[in-house]
Image (cartoon, rainbow, N blue to C red):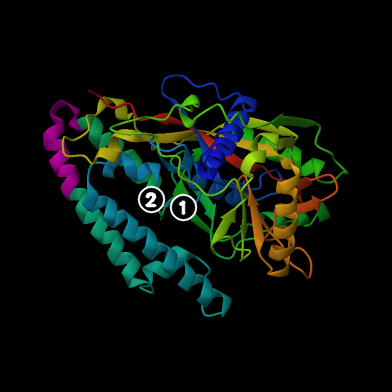
C-alpha cells in the first residue's frame, strides 16, 4: 500500500476513534469534521472575563463548513453568517472578505497606536468614527451598498416571503452591529493584544484577577456546557492530575477510505480528504515550512496509537437570535456549486488532557530516532495528529508556543506526546455540522 494511502488510514482511523468516543453518532443531516490542527479552545470560567470565551466561541462556531471535505481549517475566514446572505452571490462574498481583511488591518493599526500611547480613549469604534482608518470604513460602505441592491432583488423574487426575508435581514443586522449592544444578537469579544490561553491559566492558578480586555462586538453564540467543561479542567490543573482514560487503535490495511463515513456529501465526485501527514517533521517550528511525513513502510500495521485523555465530548453551540431558518428559502439557480454542500457548526468536539503514546516497529523506531535528533538540532518541530510541537537543542519552546511536549524512548520504541503543565483548557479536535436544508 502506498505511503499516501497509509497516511489517510491513520487520519481516518483516528477520526473514527474521536467520533465514537465523543458519541457523534449522526443523523442524516449531521456531519463530523476533524480539525487539521488541534487548537487550544478558549479559556472559560468564573475568573476569566467572558470576552475571551465569547471571542473563541465565535471564531469556531462561525466557521462555514464544506461537506465535501472530511477536515475543517480552524483559521478559515469565511463565516456562517456570510452564507445566510452571500452564499449565492460571489460579488458580495468578495466584498465581505475584503472587509474582513481591512478590519484586521484597522485592528493592528489601532493596537500599535494604543501601545505607543497615542490614543487617549481605548475604544476601537471611537477610533473608527474619528476617521483614522478610512479604508475600513470604505470597505464597510461598499458591502452595505451591495447588500442593499441584493436585498431589493431578493424581495422582488421572494414574493410572499419578502416579509420573512426582511425580518431575517433585520435580525442579522442586529447581530452584526458594531456600535450598539443587542442582547441575544451580539456579544463582546476580546480583541487586540490579548492574553494567550497559557497566560490566562497561569493567572488563574496564581489567583490573580484578570482584567477585561478591549472588546469588539461580534455575533452571539451560546455554549454554556463549554464553560463547565473548561472550568473543571482548569481546577484539575491545580493538582497533580493524571488522565484516567485511554484508547488504542491500529490501522487496518484491508480498509480503504470508502469504508469510513462521517456524513460528508458527494456531489459530482468524491469527498476531499486532503491534509498533511499524520506524523510529520518540519525544519521550522512554525510547521509552515516544508514537512516530511513519517514513512512506516512495511511496519504500518505494527504501529499502535494510544490516546490518553480525561474527557472527549460533544458540546452544543447555538447561534443567537440573529440566526435564520434557511429551509424556507430556495437557492438561486445561478448559485455556485459549493453552495450546495454547506453546513453550519452545531457542536464542538473537545478533549481535555489529550495526549498520545505511539509504539512502532524496529525500522520505524530507527527512523524516528534519527529524525528526532535532526529536527531538534535544527530547532524544528513535529506534528502528530494535528498537534504541533516545537523542538529545540537548547530546550523545548515556551508554553506560549507548545501545548504538548514530546519524549522519545528509543529502547521501548515509543513516542509520548503529553500536555504541558498548564493544561487547564480544552483542545478542539473536531466539530459536528448540520447540512443546510434549503427549500426545493
Report the residue at 42% width, 38% height from top.
69
Residue 120 in view in this figure: no
Would you place residue 167 above or below residue 96 in this image?
A: above
Q: Quadrant of residue 283?
A: bottom right
Q: Which residues are magenta?
A: 149-162
The quarter of the image holding the C terminus is top left
* C-alpha distance separating marks 2 and 1: 7 Å
Give whichever of discs 2 and 1 has the lower sequence position: 2
Report the residue at 13% width, 29% height from top.
159
Closer to the camera in the image, 272 or 42 = 272
Closer to the camera in the image, 164 or 334 = 334
Closer to the camera in the image, 394 or 233 = 394
Find out whether residue 150 is within the magenta segment. Answer: yes
Report the residue at 28% width, 27% height from top.
438
Disc number for residue 163: none
Find out whether residue 260 is within the magenta segment. Answer: no
Query: What residue did someone put label 1 on?
Result: 217
Disc 2, disc 1: CB below 8 Å? yes
Q: What element does badge 2 sit on?
A: loop
Query: What residue did someone put label 2 on?
Result: 177
Q: What element does badge 1 sit on?
A: strand
Q: Residue furthest right?
A: 240
Magenta stretch, main secondary structure, is helix
x, y (%) of residue 308?
75, 36
Label 1 neighbourhood size at 10 Å, few (<14), some (14-19), many (20+)? many
x, y (%) of residue 160?
15, 26
Amino acid at each position: 500500500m502506498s505511503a499516501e494511502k497509509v497516511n489517510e488510514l491513520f487520519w481516518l482511523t483516528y477520526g473514527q476513534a474521536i467520533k465514537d468516543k465523543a458519541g457523534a453518532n449522526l443523523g442524516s443531516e449531521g456531519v463530523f469534521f476533524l480539525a487539521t490542527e488541534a487548537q487550544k479552545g478558549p479559556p472559560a470560567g468564573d475568573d476569566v472575563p467572558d470576552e475571551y470565551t465569547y471571542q473563541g466561541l465565535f471564531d469556531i462556531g462561525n466557521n462555514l463548513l464544506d461537506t465535501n471535505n472530511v477536515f475543517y481549517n480552524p483559521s478559515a475566514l469565511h463565516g456562517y453568517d456570510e452564507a445566510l446572505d452571500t452564499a449565492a452571490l460571489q460579488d458580495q462574498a468578495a466584498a465581505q472578505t475584503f472587509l474582513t481583511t481591512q478590519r484586521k488591518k484597522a485592528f493592528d493599526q489601532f493596537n500599535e497606536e494604543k501601545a505607543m500611547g497615542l490614543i487617549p480613549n481605548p475604544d476601537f469604534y471611537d477610533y473608527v468614527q474619528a476617521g483614522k482608518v478610512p479604508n475600513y470604513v470604505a470597505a464597510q460602505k461598499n458591502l452595505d451598498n451591495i447588500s442593499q441592491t441584493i436585498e431589493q432583488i431578493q424581495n422582488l423574487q421572494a414574493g410572499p416571503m419578502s416579509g420573512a426575508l426582511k425580518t431575517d435581514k433585520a435580525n442579522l443586522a442586529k447581530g452584526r452591529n458594531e456600535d450598539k449592544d443587542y442582547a441575544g444578537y451580539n456579544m463582546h469579544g476580546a480583541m487586540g493584544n490579548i492574553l494567550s490561553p497559557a497566560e490566562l491559566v497561569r493567572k488563574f492558578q496564581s489567583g490573580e484577577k484578570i482584567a477585561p480586555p478591549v472588546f469588539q462586538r461580534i455575533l452571539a453564540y451560546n455554549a454554556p456546557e463549554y464553560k463547565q467543561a473548561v472550568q473543571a479542567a482548569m481546577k484539575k490543573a491545580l493538582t497533580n492530575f493524571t488522565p484516567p482514560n485511554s484508547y488504542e487503535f491500529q490501522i487496518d490495511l484491508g480498509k480503504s477510505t470508502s469504508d469510513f463515513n462521517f456524513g460528508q456529501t458527494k456531489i459530482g465526485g468524491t469527498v476531499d480528504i486532503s491534509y498533511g501527514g499524520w506524523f510529520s517533521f518540519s525544519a521550522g517550528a512554525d510547521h509552515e515550512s516544508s514537512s516530511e511525513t513519517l514513512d512506516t513502510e512495511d511496519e504500518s500495521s505494527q504501529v499502535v496509537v494510544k490516546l490518553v485523555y480525561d474527557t472527549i465530548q460533544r458540546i452544543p453551540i447555538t447561534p443567537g437570535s440573529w440566526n435564520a431558518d434557511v429551509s424556507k428559502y430556495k437557492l438561486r439557480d445561478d448559485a455556485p456549486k459549493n453552495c450546495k454542500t454547506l453546513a453550519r457548526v452545531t457542536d464542538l468536539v473537545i478533549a481535555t488532557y489529550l495526549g498520545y503514546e505511539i509504539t512502532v516497529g524496529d525500522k520505524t523506531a530507527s527512523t524516528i530516532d534519527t529524525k528526532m535528533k535532526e529536527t531538534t538540532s535544527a530547532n524544528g518541530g513535529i506534528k502528530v495528529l494535528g498537534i504541533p510541537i516545537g523542538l529545540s537543542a537548547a530546550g523545548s519552546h515556551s508554553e506560549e508556543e507548545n501545548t504538548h511536549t514530546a519524549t522519545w524512548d528509543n529502547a521501548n520504541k515509543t513516542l509520548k506526546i503529553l500536555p504541558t503543565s498548564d493544561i487547564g483548557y480544552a483542545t478542539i479536535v473536531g466539530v459536528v455540522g448540520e447540512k443546510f436544508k434549503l427549500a426545493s
